[in-house]
Amino acid sequence: MIRTQVGIVGAGPAGLLLSHLLHLQGIESVVVEARSRQYVEERVRAGLLEQGTADLMAESGVGERLKREGLVHHGIYLRFGGETHHIDFKSLANRCVVIYPQNKVVADLSDARLAAGGRIFYEADDVSVQDFGDANSQTRPRIRFRANAQPQEIECDYIAGCDGFHGVCRPSIPEGALTVYDRIYPFGWLGILAEAPPSSDELIYAYHERGFALLSMRSPEISRLYVQCAPDEDIHEWSDARIWDELHKRLATADGKWKLTEGPILQKGVTGMRSFVVEPMQHGKLFLAGDAAHIVPPTGAKGLNLAASDVLVLSRAFTEFYASERKEPLENYSKTCLRRVWKAQRFSWWMTSMLHLFNTDNAFDRRRQLAELDYVTSSRAASQTLAENYAGLPME
Ligand code: APR
Ligand code: PHB
C-alpha cells in the first residue's frame, strides 16, 4: 500500500502540471498513467500556449526550453475572400501567445517531476478509483491498478482525475450526480505534420467555400496544417497530393502571390470536433481537471490552456487546505473553474461557427459569416474581443 496526499490519475499536461505545482508547495502526490512514458511524450497534440500558460511554466521553473524554443506570436491572420487580415494581440490586448508543442510540455514536466523524485507509475493496467464519494467521510479514497502485473493500491486524501476525455474517473462518479452539456459538430479536421518551413510568420485561419483551413507550425522547420473534412473522413482516401492540392486551394490569396511551401508529410490523421462540459467538476473527494471535465473544438486553441488553468485553481485550493485546513477553495473548485471554462467554450464555439461550412448552411449563412469576418477585422472593438479571448482571459 502506497500512501500519499493527492493521488493523480493521468500523466498528460493536467496531471503532470498539477503534480509539479503541488510539489512546489510541499504537497506529495503520486501519478498513475495507463500508457508508456514514450507514448505520452510522442503523441502529437495541440501546440499553442496562451501567455498565462507560458508564464505559469516559467514561474514554476519548467520554462527553460520553452523560452529557448517557443515561437512568440503577436497575433494571427484571418484570410477570407482571398484577402488577409492581421489581428494584432500585442496592440489590442497587450498579450501574445507561444507556439510550443504539447508533447514538449509533457516531456519538460515529467523530467522535472522525475528529477525531483516524483513518483509516476507508467503503463498501469485496470486503473480504478474508490471510496471518494463523500467529502466529509473519514474513509480515504483509493486508486487501484496493476503495474508489471502486480496489484497496487494508493491511499490518498484526495484524487485528481486528470485522465482525459476517455479516462476512468468521470465515469466512476454515480450517474445522476453529473450533468453533461455537449454539442457535436458535423465536421472534423484532417491534420498533417509536414517537414516544410512554415509559409507564414504567424497562424493563418482561412474561411473558404471549400471549407476551413488552418496553417500552423511546430518549429521553424515543421508545419502543422489542417483542412475541414467530414467527421468520419477516411484518411486512406487522402493521398499526400490530394491534401496539398486542397490546402493550396483553401489558403490561396486573390492576388496569387502567397505561396504554400510543401514538404514530406510526417504524420496525418482525422479528429472529430465537439464541445463538452460536465458539471460539477467534482464529486466528494474526486476532482476532475482538463479534458476529463471538458472538451473544446480546436479552433480556439484552448484545450491545453484550460487544463493548465484548472490545475492552477486546484493546486491553490490544495495549498490552502494543507496550510490552514480551509476547505472552502476546494469546495468552490468547480464553480471557480467553470466560469473560465464556459467563456473558453463560448469563444471556441464562436470561432468554429464563424470559420467552418455547416451542412445546414445556405447562401444567407455564408453571407452572414463573411459579414462577421468583415466586422471582426474592421472594428477595433470586435478584433479586441477576439484578441483578448484568444490570447487568454485571466486565470483566476
Ligand atoms: N488510467 C490512467 N491514465 C489514463 C487512463 C486510465 N484509465 N485513461 C487515460 N489516461 C491517461 C492518458 O493516457 C493520458 O496520458 O490520462 C492522460 C490524459 O491526458 P490528456 O488526454 O492529454 O488530457 P489533459 O492532461 O487533460 O490535457 C488536455 O490534451 O487533448 C489535449 O487538446 C487537449 O491540449 C489539451 C490537453
Ligand atoms: C496546432 O498548431 O495544432 C493548432 C493551432 C491552433 C489551433 C488549433 C491547432 O487553433
Image (tube, grey):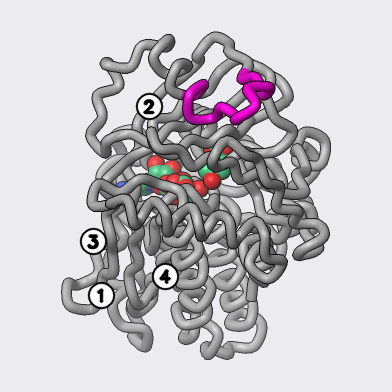
Separation of disc 3 and disc 2 at Cα? 27 Å
Give residue 221's quadrant in the image: top right
Query: Mark 2 or mark 1: which comes first in sequence?
Result: 1
Residue drawn at the location 50% of the way across and 64% of the way down: 347
Dot 1 lies on which element?
Answer: strand
Separation of disc 3 and disc 1 at Cα? 12 Å
Q: Amino acid at mark 2?
A: Gly
* Residue 3 appears in view: no
Marks 2 & 1, CB-CB < 8 Å contact = no
* Foreground: disc 3 or disc 1: 1
Q: Which residue is mark 2?
A: 269
Placement of 113 over or under 328, stated as above or below: above
Separation of disc 2 and disc 1 at Cα? 31 Å
Q: Magenta segment range?
A: 247-260
Query: Mark 3 or mark 2: which comes first in sequence?
Result: 3
* Residue 47 appears in view: yes
Dot 2 lies on which element?
Answer: strand
Magenta: main secondary structure equals loop
Along the line of sight, the residue nearer the viewer: 388 or 170: 388
Q: Which residue is mark 4?
A: 287
Query: Mark 4 or mark 1: which comes first in sequence?
Result: 1
Q: Amino acid at mark 4?
A: Phe
Q: Residues within 10 Å of mark 1 (few under 14, many from 20)?
A: few
Query: x%, y% of residue 375?
Result: 59, 62
Q: Which residue is mark 3?
A: 171
Q: Amino acid at mark 1?
A: Thr
Q: Which residue is mark 1?
A: 179
